[in-house]
Amino acid sequence: MNKTPRIGIFGGTFDPVHNAHLRIARAALDAGKLDLVYFVVAARPPHKQTVTHASPEDRLAMVRAAVEGDPRLHASDVELVREGYSYTVDTIQEFQRRHPGAELFLIIGYDSLLDLPRWRRPDHIVECCRLLVAPRPRMNEPPAPEFEGAYQILPFQETDLSSTEIRRRVAAGEPIEGLVPPAVERIIREKGIYQDANRRQPPR
């Protein structure tokens, strides 16, 4: 009898991907008893008002470098090859198409859980996926009551590490060793990504 695959979907701009992202993914693997986690690199996230700093191609390359060597972690370009904004519900439907019969788990931060009522078709999201939630600020605020029982808090210690801080450090010439995987740091240094913290890529 074949085991039903349990697949995690972890979306974000990953600008850049860093070690806390990897720890969250591995916490989800363990807590959710997942077989795989896909890092879904967003092209045009509708909830972010500013464009990304690194190009979609560079962000995808950094994620691929970060997950290399761990067969449970994969980079996905599903949102990069799709035109328009990156709506989570559309991504979930694409994963259902690509992995028929799989159990899907959406990995998000607690702040995203609080904002979920403002996402496109949140009712359909929780019908299709179990939510695995990483602790973030505002943990004292309860989520919308309709999501009760639809989520699980991951055993993950909240951290101040952020992509914003890494970009600031790179622009200031400060070290980022230990904050991102060595392969990601190599890409950032070799390509000169984030050297100018005020640089913006044109919308794609």
Image: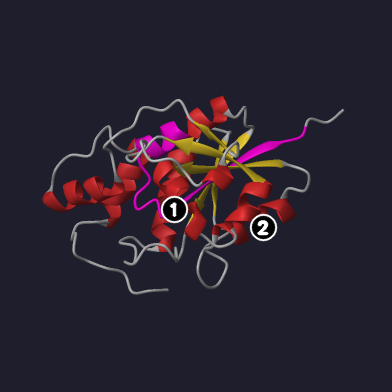
Asked whether residue 10 is drawn in magenta, I would say yes
Whether residue 141 is visible here, answered yes or no, is yes
Farthest residue, direction right = 1
Asked whether residue 93 is drawn in magenta, I would say no
Q: Position of residue 98 (x, y in %)?
A: 72, 53
Q: Nearer the viewer, residue 104 or 58?
A: 104
Q: Nearer the viewer, residue 105 or 201?
A: 105
Q: Assign a secondary structure to mark 1.
A: helix
Amino acid type, mark 2? Glu
Q: Position of residue 149 (x, y in %)?
A: 60, 36
Span of residues in magenta:
4-24
Q: Position of residue 25 (x, y in %)?
A: 49, 35
Q: CA distance from mark 1 to mark 2?
A: 22 Å
Which colouring convention does the figure follow?
A: secondary structure
Locate residue 18 relative to residue 60 in the image: left or right.
left
Q: Assign a secondary structure to mark 2.
A: helix
Q: Residue beneath label 1, please?
A: 115
Quarter placement of the N terminus: top right
For the point 46% across and 63% down, the residue is 43
Q: Nearer the viewer, residue 183 or 97?
A: 97
Quarter placement of the C terminus: bottom left
Q: Nearer the viewer, residue 48 or 119?
A: 119
Are circles 1 and 2 on residues that touch, CB within 8 Å?
no
Whether residue 9 is visible here, answered yes or no, is no
Query: Can you tell which quarter of the image residue 175 is in?
Result: top left
Locate residue 53 relative to residue 73 in the image: left or right.
left
Query: Can you tell which quarter of the image residue 82 is in?
Result: bottom right
Q: On screen, 44 above or below 115?
A: below
Q: Residue beneath label 2, please?
A: 94
Q: On screen, 185 above or below 203?
A: above
For the point 77% across and 34% down, the residue is 4
Q: Disc 1 vs disc 2: which is toward the camera?
A: 1
